[in-house]
Amino acid sequence: MRSNSCLYSPLARLLAMAAIRCEGLTKHFGDVVAVDGLDLTVAEGEIFGFLGPNGAGKSTTIDILLDFVRPTSGSVTVLGHDAQVEGRAVRQRTGVLPDAYHVYDRLTGRQHVRFACEMKGATEDPIELLERTGVAEAADRKAGGYSKGMRQRLVLAMALVGEPDLLVLDEPSTGLDPNGAREMREIIQAENDRGATVFFSSHIMEQVEAVCDRVGIIDRGTLVAENSIDGLRDATETGETLFVSVPAVDASIVERVAAIDGVADVGVEDGRLRLAVGARSKFRVLEAIDGAVGPIEDFEVVESSLEDLFVRYTTDAQEVEA
Amino acid sequence: MSAIAVAKKDFQDAIQSRALWGLVVTFVVLSTITTYGYTEAPELFGSETAPTFGGLVFFLLTFTSLFVPIAAIVVGYKSLAGERELGSIKLLLSLPTTRREVFLGKVVGRAVVLSIGLAIGVLVGLLVGAVLIGGLDATALVAFLGLTILFVAAYTAIMVSISASTGSTTRATTLAIGFFVLFELVWDAVPLAVVYVVEGFSLPSEFPAWVFIVSQVSPSNAYLSGLYALLPDVAEALDASPEGADAGQGAEPFYQTPELGLFMLALWIAVPLVVGYASFTRADL
C-alpha cells in the first residue's frame, strides 16, 4: 500500500471517481492517426480544459466520448459507463455542445429545446433555458435564420436541459463576441458550482486560463501535458520569460547567452533576447549576461501565459517526433 | 421510446419541406385529372367497358406506383446523409437516444409524412371518382389505401436506408436514383432479355416460373400484384378488359400467386431496415 502522502498525488486523483477516463485511446481514419494512445482522466466536479492546435485530435476525442466515432482501440468510460456500449446512459446525464453541428433550420429555438427536454424526460421550461443563454427573444423564430452566436446559445440551452452531471463543450466560444464568451464562462462556472463536471476544448488559451481547474494539452493525438495551470508553469522552465535588450543581437551573442549557467531556451524576439530562467536567480543571470555580451540597456520579466506553455508543449512534441 | 420523439421532430421538420408540399399538390391535381379522364372518357385510356370504382383503383395504381418512388426519393434521400453532411446528427445523437432509434424514428417520421400526403391525393382522386361513377366500393378503397401505405413504407425504408449508408448527399442521390432506374425502369427488361437470348432470340409462349419471381422483386410490380391479391374479384372482372391484358402481358403467373407481391413488399421493408441500420450503426459520423 502507498503512504498517506498519496492522497494528494495524481494517483489519488485517478482513484477518485472519474467523470471521464480514456485509456490507450486510438483512432485511425485510414492512414491518418487522429488520436494516438491517449490516456486522460477528468475527475468529477472539476472544470477541465482540453487544449490543442487545430487537428490535434480534440474533436475526435470528444466524438469518441459521445460515440459519434468508434475508436480503433482503447477504452472510454464516461460517468462510469462504457461510452461505446452504454451511450444512452452517458448522454442521459451529459449536456453537449458539439463542434461543427448544424441546427434544424425549419424548427424554432423553442422546438429545439423542447425536443431536448422530451428526449431527456426533463420538465424544464424551454423559455427559461433560452433566457439563461440569452436567446429567449428569438424563441419562436426558425433557427435557420439565427446568427452563428445565436445558434451557439441555442445549443448551449439544449445542453443545459435536465441539469446534466457532465457538460462536454467543444470550442464553446466559437461565434461568440467577447461579451458572449464571458457569459459562456459565467454559465460554465455556475454549472460547476451546481456540481457539474465541465470538459471543454478550446484553442483559445485565455478562455481556458480564466475558468479551468486543470488543463490537458493534446498534440498529434497524444496528451503532452496534464496539470493545473500553475502546475504546468512549474513543470516547465517557462514559468517566467526574461526579455533583455543589448546593443546588438546576433547568432554569436545568442550562443554566448545560451552557454550561461541557468539559462534555457534562448531566442530573439523584436530585436531583444528572449530567454527562460531556470533554477538560478534572475539577477545572477542578468549579471552574467551583462558580463558576457555587454551592457544591458533594458529588461522585462514576463510571466508566461498559457499560450506560451501551449506553444512550447506543442512545438517541443513536434521536435521530438522530427 | 425516444424513436417516437425523433419521429415526431422529424415529422415537424419534414412536413415544412416545400418540395414535399409541391409534390403533394402535384399529386392531388394529377390524380383528380386522371380520375376525371378515366371516368368521363375511359376509351381514351384503353378501357372498353363502363368505368367502375374497382377499375379506377387499378387505374390509379399505375399512377401511384410511379409517384410513390419519386416522392420517397425526394423525402428520404437526405434524411440521414443530409444530417450527417451538415452535422445536425450531432445534435440529435448528443441526446439520450441510440442510433437504432434515430434510424427507426427517421423511417417512421418520413413514412408518416409521405403517407399523409399520398392519402390526401388518393382520397381526393377516389372520392371525385366515386361521385362521377355514382358509387363507391369501400373494400377496394380500403385495400388500395392500405396497400399504398405499405408501398410507401417499403419505399421510405429503402430510401432512408440508402441515406443511412453514406455521409454524402451526392452519393445518396446517386444511389437513390440508381435504385429507381434499376428496379423500376430496367428491371422488367432484364429477365425478358435473358429469356429472349436463351430461347434463341425469340420469345416463348410460356415463360419459365423464375421470370415471374424475379419480376416481383421490383417494388412497384409487387405493389400491383399485391392489389391483385387483395382484390381478386375486381381483378378478374377487369381481366376481360384490354387494360387488364396490358397490365398482365406475359405475366400469366400473376394470377397464380399474386400474394408473392405482398411478401416482396414486406421484404422491401425488412431487408433495407436491417442493411441500413447495420451500416448506420457502424459508421463514424
Image (cartoon, coloured by chain):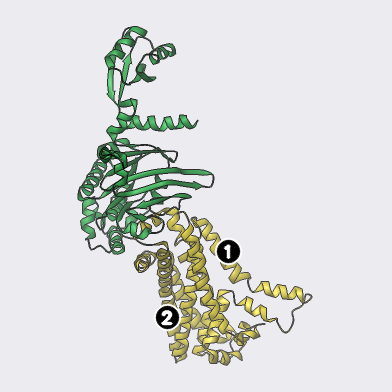
In front of the other: B130 or B278: B278
Find residue B65 and report its horizontal and vertical position in percent. Answer: 53, 76
Q: Which residue is mark 2?
A: B124
Answer with mark 1 or mark 2, whichever residue precedes in sequence. 2
Query: Looking at the figure, which quarter contains the C terminus of chain B?
Result: bottom left
Q: Which mark is residue B54?
A: none
- Give the mark toward the camera: 1 or 2: 1
Residue A39, quarter of picture: top left
- Residue drawn at x 41%, y 47% is A23
Between A52 and A136, the residue placed more toward the observer is A52
Place of residue A166 in the rendered image (x, y in percent of width and height, measured from the top left): 29, 51
Kind of residue at badge 2: Val
* Residue type marked 1: Gly
Residue A212 visible in the displayed image: no
Residue A73 appears in the picture as rendered:
yes
- For label 1, the residue is B178
Residue A231 lies in what quarter of the image?
A: top left
Q: Chain of mark 1?
A: B
> Which chain is home to disc 2?
B
Secondary structure, mark 1, is helix
Q: In this rendering, is residue B161 above or below A295? A: below
Cα separation between marks 1 and 2: 32 Å
